[in-house]
Image (cartoon, rainbow, N blue to C red):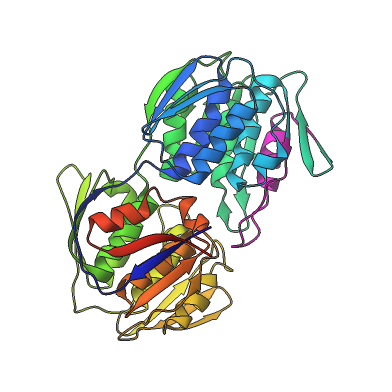
C-alpha cells in the first residue's frame, strides 16, 4: 500500500494540464453498453475508478482497449449480470443498470459498496427505472430488474432529500433513450457531467433536450450507434489545484479547464482574497495567491452551487486563512472526517451537525495522517503543502480513485512530494 510524503514549504509555480472528468467518464463508459458498435472516448483519466468501470465492461463481455487516455469499447455481445467482486469496489458502477436494462431487457447488479461520507441510497435510481416499467426484485444482495415487454416513457421526479441525484439522472436518462415514447425527468441533476453524458448519447442517435437544466426530455429511439467523444475537463481536479495554488503558489497556470463549470469554486477562492485570471476562451486560468486574505462562509449545493466535492479542499485552504470561516455541507452532512486529521496538523476546526467552523491559524505542522475518502485525501495533501515539516499521508488508494498522477503534477509545479511503500 502506498503513502504520500509531502515536504511542506515549497512554493508552487508553473503550469499543468487538467485531466478529463472522472465523474463524466464513468457514466459515459457505461453508456457504451447501449450499442454493439465501436465507441471511442478520449481524455478518460487513468484513475482506479475508471479502471474498475473498464473491468466491469470487460467482465460483461465487452471488447475494451485503453491507450494514452483513449478508450475504445465494443459491446456487441454482453451479459446482463454485473459481477459482485467488481461492483462492490465502486459505487458509481450502479450506472450500468440503466443501459443494461434498456439493451437486454434484464439486468442483475449487486448493491454497490458505499463511500464512508454518508448514506447514498439507490432508491431514486430504482424509482425512476420502475416508472419506466421495470420490475424490481432483491435477493442475496443483488438487484434484478426486468422489462420483458420493453421500457415505456414516463414522467419521473428524481428529487431526493439532499437534492437531485446525479447518477440517478444518468441511469434513467440512459434507460429512457431506448424506451418507447417520451420520458420527462423533473428535478433532474444539472451538473456538467450530466450534460456531457447527454451530448454523448445524442451523438449516438438519442433525442435528449434540456440536459443541464432541472427538466430533461428524452424521446425514445429504436437503436443507438457508435461514436467518438472527448470528455469534459475535471472541474473538481481543477478546483483542487486552484486551492493548492491559493494556498502555496506564486502564479500557477491550469490548462484544459472550463471557466463556466468553475464559477462557484472561483467565486469562493476570490472571496477569500486570491485572484484568478482566465483567458478569453475560458480554458486556461492562472491563480495568484494574495497574502491579504479573509475567512468566508460556504454552503454546498447542487450545481451551479458550491460543490460538496470541493468542501474538504476549501476547508484545508481556510485552515490557514485569517479570521473565521463557516462551511455547511447540505449534500453530505457527515462529510467532515478530514477535519479530525487537519486538527492533528494544528488546524482549529469545530464540527457540529453538518457545519464546520474554522478559525484560521498562522501555521500548520506535519503529522502522520490518514485519508478517509477521495476528497478528504486531497485536502490533506493541500494542508501538507503549507505545513512545517514532512507529512505522511496513508491510505493513498483513496486519492488514486479520482486524481490522475497527482504526485507527478505537484512535482511539475515544484512541490516536494514522494510516493513510498507503506510498511
Q: Residue at x 63, y 58 (%)?
A: 161
Give the left or right position of residue 152, taking residue 230 as reference: right
Whole-percent x, y for residue 373 in the image: 53, 61
Residue sticking out furthest to the front: 423
Image position of 73 with respect to 244: above or below:
above
Please report the residue visible at 66 percent of the width from the left and 41 percent of the height from the top: 87
Q: Measured along the vertical axis of the image, is residue 327 above or below residue 413? A: below
128 sits left or right of 420 in the view = right
Identify whether 72 is placed above or below 252. above
Q: Residue at x 72, y 40 (%)?
A: 84
What's drawn in magenta, residue-wise?
109-136
Q: Nearer the viewer, residue 56 or 181?
A: 56
Tell me if I can see residue 298 in this picture: no
- Residue 133 in the magenta stretch? The answer is yes
Toward which corner of the image does residue 186 lie, by quadrant? top right
Residue at 69% in and 30% down: 132
Q: Position of residue 374 (x, y in %)?
A: 50, 58
Evaluate whether residue 143 shows in this view: yes
197 part of magenta stretch = no
Q: Is residue 320 left or right of residue 180?
A: left
- What x and y, as percent, mark residue 131? 71, 34
The residue at the far right in this view is: 139
Amino acid at each position: 500500500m502506498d503513502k504520500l510524503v509531502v515536504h511542506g514549504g515549497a512554493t508552487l509555480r508553473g503550469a499543468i494540464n487538467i485531466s478529463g472528468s472522472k465523474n463524466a467518464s464513468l457514466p459515459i463508459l457505461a453508456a457504451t453498453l447501449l450499442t454493439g458498435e465501436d465507441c471511442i472516448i478520449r481524455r478518460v483519466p487513468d484513475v482506479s475508478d475508471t479502471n474498475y468501470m473498464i473491468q466491469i465492461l470487460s467482465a460483461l463481455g465487452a471488447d475494451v482497449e485503453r491507450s494514452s487516455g483513449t478508450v475504445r469499447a465494443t459491446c456487441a455481445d454482453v451479459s446482463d449480470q454485473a459481477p459482485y467482486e467488481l461492483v462492490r469496489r465502486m459505487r458509481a458502477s450502479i450506472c450500468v443498470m440503466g443501459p443494461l436494462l434498456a439493451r437486454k431487457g434484464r439486468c442483475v447488479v449487486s448493491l454497490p459498496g458505499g463511500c464512508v461520507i454518508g448514506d447514498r441510497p439507490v432508491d431514486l435510481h430504482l424509482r425512476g427505472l420502475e416508472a419506466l416499467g421495470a420490475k424490481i426484485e432483491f435477493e442475496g444482495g443483488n438487484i434484478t430488474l426486468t422489462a420483458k415487454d420493453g421500457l415505456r416513457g414516463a414522467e419521473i421526479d428524481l428529487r431526493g432529500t439532499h437534492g437531485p441525484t446525479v447518477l440517478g439522472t444518468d441511469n434513467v436518462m440512459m434507460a429512457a433513450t431506448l424506451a418507447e415514447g417520451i420520458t420527462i425527468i423533473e428535478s433532474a441533476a444539472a451538473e456538467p457531467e450530466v450534460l456531457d453524458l447527454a451530448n454523448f448519447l445524442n451523438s449516438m442517435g438519442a433525442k435528449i433536450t434540456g440536459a443541464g437544466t432541472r427538466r430533461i426530455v428524452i424521446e425514445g429511439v429504436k437503436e443507438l450507434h457508435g461514436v467518438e467523444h472527448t470528455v469534459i475537463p475535471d472541474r473538481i481536479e481543477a478546483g483542487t489545484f486552484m486551492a493548492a495554488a491559493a494556498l502555496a503558489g506564486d502564479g500557477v497556470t491550469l490548462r484544459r479547464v472550463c471557466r463556466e463549470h468553475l464559477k462557484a469554486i472561483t467565486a469562493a477562492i476570490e472571496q477569500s482574497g486570491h485572484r484568478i485570471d482566465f483567458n478569453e476562451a475560458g480554458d486556461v486560468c492562472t491563480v495568484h495567491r494574495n497574502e491579504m486574505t479573509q475567512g468566508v462562509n460556504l454552503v454546498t449545493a447542487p450545481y451551479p452551487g458550491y460543490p460538496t466535492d470541493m468542501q474538504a479542499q476549501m476547508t484545508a485552504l481556510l485552515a490557514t486563512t485569517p479570521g473565521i470561516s463557516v462551511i455547511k455541507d447540505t449534500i453530505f452532512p457527515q462529510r467532515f472526517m478530514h477535519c479530525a486529521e487537519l486538527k492533528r496538523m494544528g488546524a482549529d476546526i469545530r464540527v457540529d451537525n453538518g457545519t464546520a467552523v474554522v478559525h484560521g491559524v498562522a501555521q500548520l505542522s506535519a503529522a502522520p495522517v490518514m485519508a478517509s475518502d477521495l476528497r478528504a485525501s486531497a485536502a490533506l495533501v493541500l494542508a501538507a503543502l503549507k505545513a512545517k515539516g514532512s507529512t505522511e499521508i496513508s491510505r493513498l488508494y483513496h486519492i488514486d480513485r479520482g486524481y490522475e498522477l497527482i504526485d507527478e503534477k505537484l512535482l511539475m509545479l515544484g512541490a516536494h512530494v514522494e510516493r513510498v511503500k507503506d510498511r
